[in-house]
Amino acid sequence: MTKYRVAVDDIEELAELEDSWLPADYIAILTSLDIADATQIDVADLREMTLFALQDLEPPQAAAVLLKYKLGTKLSPGQIKNYSIESQHERLWEQSADLALHQSLFAVAGMLNAVNAMAFPVPDALRVSLSIQCDDTAQLAVFSDAMNRVLLIQMLSAGMTESAILNRLFGEQIAAGKVPDADSIIWRIDVDSSDDSMRRIKITSSAYWLNALRETESFEWDSGAG
């Protein structure tokens, strides 16, 4: 049983995640749109060219192109059609019943908003920076880039009120230490272990899950609780 002291140092709002779309992705999308010599476009211009190409389409068509590219192996043609329409007014990155799709849907939403901000909602994710300390510094080793996401969710839960969405939907699972969707809830984690006396970590996920931390400055987490 270890008690950790956690401080919320910063909360950064994100409309897109770094590296969600790479040059190879832009080339593939342009090629799917029959853009000639897509491979010859300068890397610095690929994103802009992709946005221009998608802007020539009707909003549902642009959405369908990106959904098919990003999730074509996970969604049926019927689902892609439905999502392409719903993407204009639904926050699919937090409303889809399949949490495993949320990060990819967020990536799609980010590009669609860049294509046409009037037609598509602004996606919102948060990157929360935390500093973590405990009396037994050896116990800080549990925090790493590859750490168990369930453990991380248990810690975040301790910094939120009972009415927070994360606690309302997964409270029993969190208490039991079994959260099957943990890897889908936490999109990214970056751990700085350069200071032996603490761990500084950055957690990225949908604002849907992390918004409750906006009201938190610091909290304690007993890793043996529950």
Image (tube, rainbow, N blue to C red):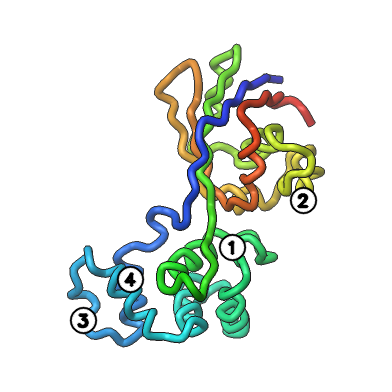
Name above or below for residue 17 compared with residue 115: above
What amino acid type is highlighted by mark number 1? Trp
In this image, 72 relative to 3: left or right? left
Quadrant assignment for the C terminus = top right
**Mark 1 vs mark 4: which is more N-terminal?**
4
Q: Are marks 2 and 4 in contact (CB under 8 Å)?
A: no
Q: Are marks 1 and 3 in contact (CB under 8 Å)?
A: no
Residue to which mark 4 is pinned? 26
Q: Tag 1's secondary structure?
A: helix
What amino acid type is highlighted by mark number 2? Leu
Give the CA separation, mark 3 to mark 2: 48 Å
User: Foreground mark, 1 or 4?
Assistant: 1
In this image, 19 relative to 80: left or right? left
Q: How many marks?
A: 4
Q: Nearer the viewer, residue 142 or 216?
A: 216
Residue 169 is tagged as: 2
What amino acid type is highlighted by mark number 3? Asp
User: Foreground mark, 1 or 3?
Assistant: 1
User: Foreground mark, 3 or 2?
Assistant: 2
